[in-house]
Image (cartoon, grey):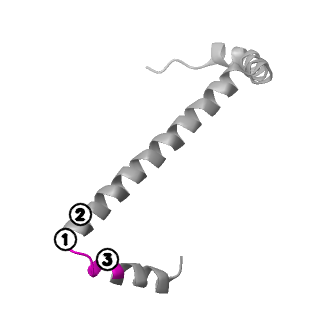
Amino acid sequence: MSMATLSDIENSITQLSLSEQLRLMEYLARRIRQQTTQRQSRIEDDLAAMANDPYIQNEIQQINEEFAVTEMDRLEII
């Protein structure tokens, strides 16, 4: 968004009454919360799908097998 557009929006907001500005702020806060919640939900759904994907499960199993020897060789921290 250009600076001119943001400036126009800011000028429009200053022309609103305080109650209208408050209503606008509440609307924006509600909308941002909803979008954040939806985005988080999509991320969680994607992670669950990956966790249930047989190909991903196989890859994780192979990685675990490759690092099993390394896990047993790790030094103890005193």
Judging by the rendered image, the residue that carries numbered circle 2 is 22
Residue 65: x %, y % from top left: 75, 15
28 up-or-down from 54: above or below:
below
Residue type at tag 2: Leu
Amino acid under disc 3: Ile
| Residue situated furthest bottom in the rendering | 4
26 left or right of 63? left
Q: Gap in Å between the C-alphas at discs 3 and 2?
A: 10 Å
Q: Quadrant of residue 11?
A: bottom left
Q: Residues within 10 Å of mark 3 (few under 14, many from 20)?
A: some
Residue plotted at (56% across, 32% down): 44
* Among the two numbered marks 1 and 3 on one chain, the one whose residue lies closer to the N terminus: 3
Are the residues tagged 1 and 3 within 8 Å (C-beta)? no
Quadrant in which the C terminus is drawn: top left
Q: Secondary structure at mark 3?
A: helix
Asked if marks 2 and 1 touch (Cβ < 8 Å), the reply is yes
Q: Residues within 10 Å of mark 2 (few under 14, many from 20)?
A: few
Q: Which residue is mark 1?
A: 18
Q: Magenta segment range?
A: 12-17
Q: Residue at 39% of width from left, 47% of height from top?
A: 33
In the image, is 72 to the left or to the right of 17?
A: right
Label 1: few (<14), some (14–19) or many (≥20) C-alpha neighbours in 10 Å = few
Kind of residue at badge 1: Leu
Q: Secondary structure at mark 1?
A: helix
Viewer-side residue, 48 vs 6: 6
Q: Position of residue 38 (x, y in %)?
A: 51, 41
In the rendered image, the vertical position of residue 3 relative to residue 53, given as above or below: below
The stretch drawn in magenta includes residue 14: yes
